[in-house]
Image: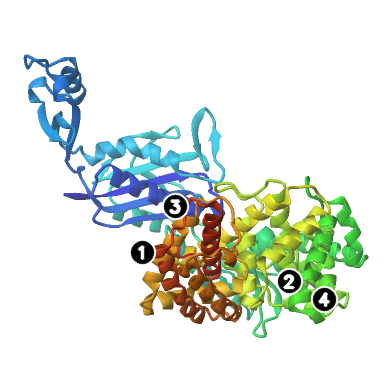
Amino acid sequence: MTAELLLEIGTEEIPAGYLENGLEELKRLAGDCLRENRIDLTGGLDVYGTPRRLVLIARGVSKKQQDLTQEVTGPPKKVAYDKNGAPTKAAAGFAKKQGVSVHELQTIETSKGEYLYVKQEIPGRPTLEILSERLPGIIGEIPWPKSMRWGEVGFPFVRPVHWILCLFDGQMVSFEAAGVQSGNNTFGHRFMAPEGVNVSTIDDYQKAMENAFVVLDPHERQQVVLKVARDAAANVGGVPADDPELVQTVANLTEYPTAVCGSFENAFLDLPDAVLITAMREHQKYFAVYDDQGSLMPNFVAINNTMTRDESVVCRGHERVLRARLSDANFFLKEDRKRPLLERLEDLKQVIYQAQLGTSYAKVMRIEALTAYIAAQVIPKQIDRARLAARLAKCDLVTHMVIEFPSLQGAVGKAYAELEGYDEEISSGIYDHYLPLKAGGALPQTQIGAVVGMADRLDTIAGCFAVGLEPTGKADPFALRRHALAIIRIIEDTGWDLSFKALVEKALSLLAEDITFDFDDTFGRLTAFIRERYKNMMLRSDYASDLVEAAICGEFDRILSLRPKMEQLTDFALSSEEFTPLALTFKRVNNIIKNQGRMFSVDPALFKEDAEKDLWKTYQSLKDDVEKCIGKSDFLDALGMMTRLRTPVDQLFDHVEILTDNEALRENRVGLLQLISSFVLTIADFSKFSI
């Protein structure tokens, strides 16, 4: 027998950015609870939510948990009974703990001898009872970025809880959470249907919400937002901005979205587009409106949470608020334009970037030097322009506009640079150097922006690692993981064959001119960090874990060559009969050398056996050709050549005592294997393959 579960947590307005994750966590916790308590779920488990409510609906929930067969092993039989066969205290204690009489104890034969044993059939409890016990904990365990406590209630939650509706199989599930007793009562829209409503089934509840001006499904509300925004913009012959993130935000701010289209003075269109859009979007959650040519119109669309009796009154209210914002922006623009952008570079000397890393000015100087280093390798004809873009890149941080609208950093710099007559590559580079803004986001569209962006991120990562601010667990306050992935993505996108180790060394060398730190230790931790980010990125790209480990553990420098290497390693593993024997041979090599502690040199004059000489000769004949293939990323050809090492290595193991008592011979032979291993590691660490 199955039933349906309905849980609604009614709250004060939940922040828009918290809602989606809160619903996912509620779904996860509820699913875990059912599984842990052996409660079958044959139907769906769905979550819905609005700013005022979190809703969980489960169908096909078993009315009782599964019966449990519990088998418990106790003390050894020889300890549980005395020589006369009478039960000892050990037997009596075990029986009492398991809730059975001594006479019900059984014995079982194990590898260690006979032990006492109890097998119990524990009948499943009613699901209603379990839900009553567990639901308060589930509600309290939902993780939020920030939680509140209110009144005398010691229950932390995202916002104060006003009601809890909970029904199972048509019955009320009784419990208390956040100082609120559960019931069968819910409430509609705060303004348009505030009266309480009693419900007894999920269908009753859903109909009640429809009648009470509540669109429960966040995705359905997003579609409503899109429709009403387009309809409102169409009234003035325009279309709203294509902004999925804003659609999600306003959908999570409303229960019943409606829209109005307002206007502002044409003079404000003289503001840079980015400023206009941000003033509307960031502070007021308004959609900008475009004409059929893609140009901004002096209009906006505002999403409301109620039906309006008089749209003109509502529009005037929105227009008044926006006019004040745009007037401020216009004032900031005029004030900022009184000084050239580059002149503001000196102002950065008064801005602390990070207490241990100095000022933003010092950071810009390092970025400029690192930009020049990178540009010399990839865009040598644009070094001077790239350096100029690097000097300009952070100047907008001290403008009135960015201080008021922080999200406009980069965009304001670009707009001001264009107004001052800088060319497109430099102006766009100022904005581009911040890209990607998030994981998977758009990459820089200009080469200068890509170079400055890499320099900026490398300096940030180097600085944080140098002063011990690397990420720990989930904590990553400086977004170093995102910066590392951005560097990797930019290199792959541009096709620049840069030495990653050389970039890190240069970044740390520039940093060492400003602060003191352990260079070698920082270099090791930083490169390991970037390698781990690359590894995780590749695993998300569906490459096999052992393949990724094998490709990047041995040599992690030329990032551009790593994907071709993994693809060709995959081809080699699937198509060559030599793959498995070669991998096994070099696993054997690694087993010999892994605990040697240091690298040994090789002196061919100390070779005593033909197998040593043959391996050395084969290595010497292959070395140059393999290096040429690797330089051209022809890893498949290089692997084919390396298969010629397998037979002489096997011969060495079969006919030569590697770890001989003669110290000079032993070190020379280990050194030979170390040299061969290092040679193979330029392509892959075969010990990582699961064979």
Secondary structure beneath label 2: helix
Query: Would you say the residues marked 3 and 4 are in contact, meaning their CB atoms lie under 8 Å apart?
Result: no
Residue 691 badge: 1
Position of the C terminus, as image quadrant, is bottom left
Q: Earlier in the sequence, mark 3 or mark 4?
A: 3
Residue denoted by label 2: 451
Please, what secondary structure does the residue beneath circle 1 have? loop
The residue drawn where x is 44% and y is 32% is 179
The image shows residue 394 at horizontal and vertical percentages of 80, 62
On the image, numbered disc 3 is attached to which residue? 23
Q: CA distance from mark 3 to mark 4?
A: 50 Å
Closer-to-camera residue (22/562): 562
Image position, residue 627 (x, y; %) = 59, 77
203 or 618: which is nearer to us?
618
Residue 383 bears which disc, if any? 4
**Distance from label 4 to label 2 (Cα)?**
10 Å
Q: Earlier in the sequence, mark 1 or mark 3?
A: 3
The mark lying in front, picked from 2 and 3, is 2
Q: Counting residues from the N terminus, which is met first, the one under dot 4 or under dot 2?
A: 4
Amino acid type for the residue under numbered disc 3: Leu
Determine crowd level at label 2: few under 14, some 14-19, many 20+ residues with C-alpha closer than 10 A: many
Viewer-nearest of discs 2 and 1: 1
State which tag comes first along the sequence, 2 or 1.
2
